[in-house]
Amino acid sequence: MASTQYQGTGTTTGGAGSRYWRKRSAYLGVVPFFIFTGIFLIYPTYSVITGAFRNEAGEFDTAKIDELLASPIVRKAFYNSLEISFKTAVLGAILGGLFAWALVSGKPGGRFYKITVAISSVLAQFGGVMLTFAFLATFGFNGVVSSIFVKLAPDSFLAQSSWLYTINGLAVVYTFFQIPLMVLVFLPTIENMKPQWREASDSLGGSPLEYWRSVGIPVLTPSFFGAMLLLFVNSFSAYATAATLVNLSDFLTPLQIGNALSSEVGNANPQTAKALSLAMVIVVIIVMALYAQIRRRVSRWEDRK
């Protein structure tokens, strides 16, 4: 009997110990995530916020921020960044949303659907230098399309490649990678719309307009604006595409930050870069706070489904 009790106790203790280590190992799995987040997100953000209010001697000083706020060049670049981010977010959200709706309206899960989603996953990351050179080779000076239009329609805007190097041309390039990102973000929301809702509306004598006004639009609107906010942040923080296409260091705030960090004439100014970055951090925090509010509303709707 004593032997049996001893074995049972040992088994129980071993089971408890096993559960203990399994529980601890589950927490260990997220340690790399927190390390990565701390090194590449939290610390840089902290460095930017604190560094913006310090001078070269490391003392608290707001002179650099006051100087930048009074600079018309800085204000113009910041306005350009907001403008192009807003334009590309709206245009990318509309076109990407319509394309996502077309995919769901077709044959979800079919070959075309899978290929399109896979291509969107690639194109959403196809930014920076590669995308810029692709547009330059197509629409730039001596590009394929521009060369054709120089011969066929020399007075058309496609024959005049100068449009590509303006803020509107940069917006076109940004929109190219905004559309597939919108497809990926917005597609699950459209897929979650149940066909029974439309059938219930039809059985109650509702018209298609009434269905969209009472069901479709209210359900899709929060996710649509949430996705548009993500597109805004994606465009607002883009650097490589603008740096390659637009040869003006004062055109956008990210370009000003890059110029302040790596001046070719040896006048690098980290304090200026941090003060400029602070403005971008504030905008991103505001946008992401709005996105969190929208996601909370969407989550409540998904929980009620």
Image: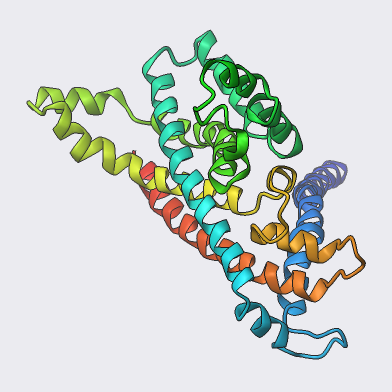
Furthest-right residue in this view: 266
- Residue 194 is left or right of residue 143, and the answer is left
Q: Is residue 35 above or below residue 188?
A: below
- Residue 30 is left or right of residue 193, and the answer is right
Question: What is the quadrant of the C terminus in the image?
Answer: top left
Of 15 and 178, nearer the camera is: 178
* Residue 110 shows in the view: yes
Question: What is the quadrant of the N terminus in the image?
Answer: top right
So how many labels did they put on this image? Answer: 0
Of 148 and 228, nearer the camera is: 148
Q: Tell me which corner region of the image, top left, top right, bottom left or bottom right, holds residue 34.
A: bottom right
Q: Is residue 241 above or below residue 293?
A: above
* Residue 174 shows in the view: no
Q: Tell me which corner region of the image, top left, top right, bottom left or bottom right, holds residue 161.
A: top right
Which residue is pictured at 78% across the width and 84% down the height?
Answer: 54
Furthest-top residue in this view: 111
Which residue is pictured at 56% across the width and 22% down the height?
Answer: 117
- Residue 301 is left or right of residue 268, and the answer is left
Of 173 and 54, nearer the camera is: 173
Which residue is pictured at 64% across the width and 58% down the height?
Answer: 252
Q: Tell me which corner region of the image, top left, top right, bottom left or bottom right, holds residue 63.
A: bottom right
